[in-house]
Image (cartoon, rainbow, N blue to C red):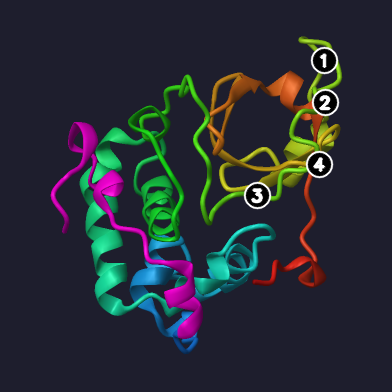
Amino acid sequence: MENPGAQGWAILALEPIPLADLQARPPRDPEGLKVLRALMQASSAKRLGHLREQLALPGTHRHLLPRLTDAELDRAAKAASHDAPRIPGGMPNAGYYALDRLLGKAFTAEALSGQRSPTPQPALGHAYDVKNEGARPAPVQADAPVDAAIEAEGALAAGKIWRHKASGTLVRIERIDGPTVYLDSGESMRIAKFSTSHVKYTFTPQQVADD
């Protein structure tokens, strides 16, 4: 494992793999990569659907994850294990952070620890396709009720993808703490506001991002 980086974060010390290098490598069957499946919370055969969905996540380069070498995956696992006690959500979130770091996503110590970063960092590799970046969210009622049907479907849960109504930006829920939802962008807001300014994103195979 690389020496822990800024403020002792091993994930920040991981050296990203150039995407061109990954694209030049032959693909491997992700179902046979035990370390990758463990990091993506898909060790169980029942979670293979989740694995495929995450690897095909639109606007990201996660489809290149199976091209990481065993040594690179081991480094990600060690870094995630080292940092997990300091990351909200523990190892499940730490695993994804480590993998996305290898794909080039820029993290800050504040983002990893669940604190809001004062300056948004570019998401290199894990970035979602942001359309109309300057668009402002439509005003929402702070105490708007959360749709009970959405909660019943489990859409308001860590790992779920939602789309901003105004800009079309895709975001992933990192964790939910009481009435507050925390996003992978480092942003946080009240659940009531989030559920009115965003809609649940439904994945279709045709939407897989190509390089």
Magenta residues, as a range?
1-24
Which residue type carries mark 3? Answer: Tyr
Quarter-of-image position of residue 7: top left
- Give yes or no for residue 125 being in the magenta stretch: no
Which residue type carries mark 2? Answer: Thr
Q: CA distance from mark 2 to mark 4?
A: 14 Å
* Earlier residue among tags 3 and 1: 3
Which mark, by number, is residue 128? 3
Give coordinates of residue 182: x percent, y percent.
Answer: 56, 29
Quadrant the N terminus occupies = bottom left
SS label for mark 2: helix
Quarter-of-image position of residue 176: top right
* Mark 3 vs mark 1: in front: 3
Which residue is labeled 4 in the image? 168
* Earlier residue among tags 3 and 4: 3
* Mark 2 vs mark 1: in front: 2
Q: Are marks 3 and 4 in contact (CB under 8 Å)?
A: no
In this view, 187 is above or below 58? above
Q: CA distance from mark 3 to mark 2?
A: 20 Å
* Mark 4 vs mark 1: in front: 4
SS label for mark 1: loop
Give coordinates of residue 74: x percent, y percent.
Answer: 25, 68
Q: Please give left or right for residue 122 compared with residue 168 in the image.
A: left
Q: Are marks 2 and 1 in contact (CB under 8 Å)?
A: yes
In this view, 141 is above or below 202? above
Q: Residue at x 53, y 56 (%)?
A: 125
